Image (tube, rainbow, N blue to C red):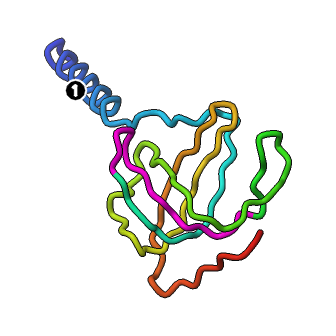
Amino acid sequence: MPSCLRHRFACALLAVALAGACSRAPASTLGPAARHYTVRGEVVRVAHEAGGLSLLIHHEAIPDFVDRSGAPVGMAAMTMPFPAGPGVAAAEVRPGDKIRFRFGVDWERNTTELESIERLPPDTALTFGKP
């Protein structure tokens, strides 16, 4: 391959690599010991706060929730805030939307983070009973 073509090829590869690095979402705030839960709920409020996007969600009970010590304690249905993690497309949801969402809890870093959201059909029946 002539040196001019090698140079162009190398520049093209470098440009692709840099573009990929620039488009990556910021790293999660959760550490490797975080626990992850998938639950359904209804969006109560979408808030744009200084720290980023946060959703107030009335969620169903989480029977397999564990506490700081690792003991399974369950969590009753409740309304609580979830800060959206990097790359979470939460801006499309509105109060009243029913969703399935995944969140992580990192007891070592004392943080919770919304990891993904999926909108559910409006007629989805949610159950807000005990775990």
The amino acid type, in three-letter code, at marker 1 is Ala
Q: Nearer the viewer, residue 78 or 61?
A: 78
Picture residue at 31% right of the left edge, 36% below the top: 23
Q: In the shown orientation, is residue 65 left or right of residue 84?
A: right
Picture residue at 44% right of the left edge, 83% below the top: 122
Q: Nearer the viewer, residue 27 or 5?
A: 27
Locate residue 57, reporting x and y percent.
51, 63
Picture residue at 53% right of the left edge, 83% below the top: 124
Residue 45 colored in magenta in the image: no
Return the residue found at the far left.
Answer: 4
Picture residue at 35% right of the left edge, 45% below the top: 49
Q: Is residue 37 above or below residue 76?
A: above
Q: Is residue 102 above or below residue 99?
A: above
Residue 49 colored in magenta in the image: yes
Q: In the shown orientation, is residue 110 left or right of residue 56?
A: right
Q: Is residue 47 above or below residue 62?
A: above
What SS does tag 1 mark? helix
Please give the range of residues in magenta.
Answer: 48-62
In the picture, the quarter occupied by the N terminus is: top left
- Within-10-Å neighbours for mark 1: few <14, some 14–19, many 20+: few
Locate residue 56, reporting x and y percent.
47, 59
Question: Which of the 4 quarters of the picture holds residue 75?
Answer: bottom right
In the picture, the quarter occupied by the C terminus is: bottom right
Return the residue found at the far bottom.
Answer: 123
Return the residue found at the far top.
Answer: 3
Query: Which secondary structure type mostly characterizes the magenta part of the structure?
Result: strand
Locate residue 7, reporting x and y percent.
19, 15
The residue that label 1 is drawn on is: 12
Return the residue found at the far right.
Answer: 71
Locate residue 30, reporting x and y percent.
58, 36
Question: Which of the 4 quarters of the picture holds residue 51?
Answer: top left
Q: In the shown orientation, is residue 73 left or right of residue 40?
A: right
